[in-house]
Amino acid sequence: MTTTALGTWRQPPLVYVVAELVISPYYSLAGKVPGLQDRLRSSFPRTLEAKELVVDGAKPSAQPLWQLMSADQRLGVQLGTRAISLHATSYLQSSDFLSRWAEVLDATQQADLGAFVERAGLRYVDLIVPSAGKAPGDYLVDNLKGIVPDGAQCTGSMWAAAFQFDGSIVNLRAGAPSPQGMLLPPDFNALPLAKPAVMLEAEARLKASQPIGFVDTDCLREIGRVFEANELLDHYTAMQKLTSKTFKSALSATARGEWM
C-alpha cells in the first residue's frame, strides 16, 4: 500500500486501514440495508451477516451487523446500529481509499438514513517486520523506545500518546517489540479480509518466536451533526493528512531508509 501524503513507498509497512462513522443508535437500520446493499453491490458483491454484543444499560443485547465485501476480499463495508465503516487491506494510494469511502458515503446519503453522526475516525495500522540484523525498536525514533534494564531482554514494549490538532485528536500507539503473540494492536477489530504480504510475513515471524512491531495511528474528530456526505468527506481528507504527519514523526532514519 502507498499513501499520497507519504509519497510512493518502496516497502510500505501499512497493512490495514479503517474509516468509521460512529452514529447515534439506529435500531431500524435493517430496513435501510437492502437499499444500501443495492447501491454498493457493484463494488461489494459479497454479504456476510453477524452480530455484535451491545451493552446499553443493565441488559446487553445482540445487534445485527452486515459486512459487504469486494470480490477479492480486500475491501469491506460494515453496517451496524452504532457505526458505518470501510475496511481495506489493499489500495493504490490514499486518494483511492478516500474515493471508495466517498462511494459508501454517497450510497448512505442516497439511502436517506438521516443518521446522526457522533464521531468520525480514521485508523492506520503499520507492522514492523525487521530486516536481518535489525530489531523492531530500530524503526522508531529514540523517544519511543523506552528502557531495557541491565541484564534484561525486552519481550514487549508499548508507547502511547494523544495529540490535539484543530478539531481533531490523533492517538499514536507503538509496540516495538509487540507483546508476545500479538499481531495487531489491542482493541482492534478486523474484518475477515485478505491479508497483505507484510501481515503474512509478520504472522510467520510470530510463529517462529521472532519479534515484530506495530504503529497504530488513529485520528478522531467529533461531528455532532446529521449525516451529510460531502461535509464528511472533507473532514476525512483533512484527517488523512494529520495521520500521515503523526506517523512520519515516529519513524527513525532506519525506517525511512528501508520503507520510503
Image (spheres, rainbow, N blue to C red):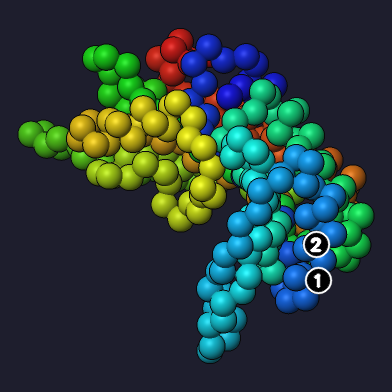
Q: Spatial distance from mark 2 to mark 1, Cα to Cα?
A: 7 Å
User: Is residue 173 shown left or right of residue 76?
Assistant: left
In this orientation, does residue 238 appear?
no
Q: Say which residue appears at 67% left-offset and 64% top-offset.
A: 80
Name the residue nearer the viewer: 248 or 150: 248
In this orientation, does residue 123 appear?
yes
User: Is residue 162 shown left or right of residue 175?
Assistant: right
Name the residue furthest bottom: 58
User: Is residue 14 shown left or right of residue 2?
Assistant: left
Q: Position of residue 32 (x, y in %)?
A: 82, 66
Q: Say which residue appears at 28% left-offset and 24% top-offset.
A: 135
Give the residue type at disc 1.
Gly
Q: Is residue 248 above or below residue 10?
A: below
Give the residue type at disc 2.
Pro
Q: Which residue is mark 1?
A: 31
**Which secondary structure lies at badge 2?**
helix
Name the residue furthest left: 151
Q: Position of residue 76 (x, y in %)?
A: 64, 46
Q: Which residue is mark 2?
A: 34
Q: Is residue 67 above or below residue 254?
A: below
Name the residue nearer the viewer: 184 or 236: 184
Using a 10 Å C-alpha cutoff, classify the residue at mark 2 as few (fewer than 14 neighbours), some (14 to 19) or many (20 or more): few
Q: Position of residue 77 (x, y in %)?
A: 68, 50
Name the residue nearer the viewer: 99 or 175: 99
Q: Position of residue 164 (x, y in %)?
A: 64, 46
Q: Are marks 2 and 1 in contact (CB under 8 Å)?
A: yes
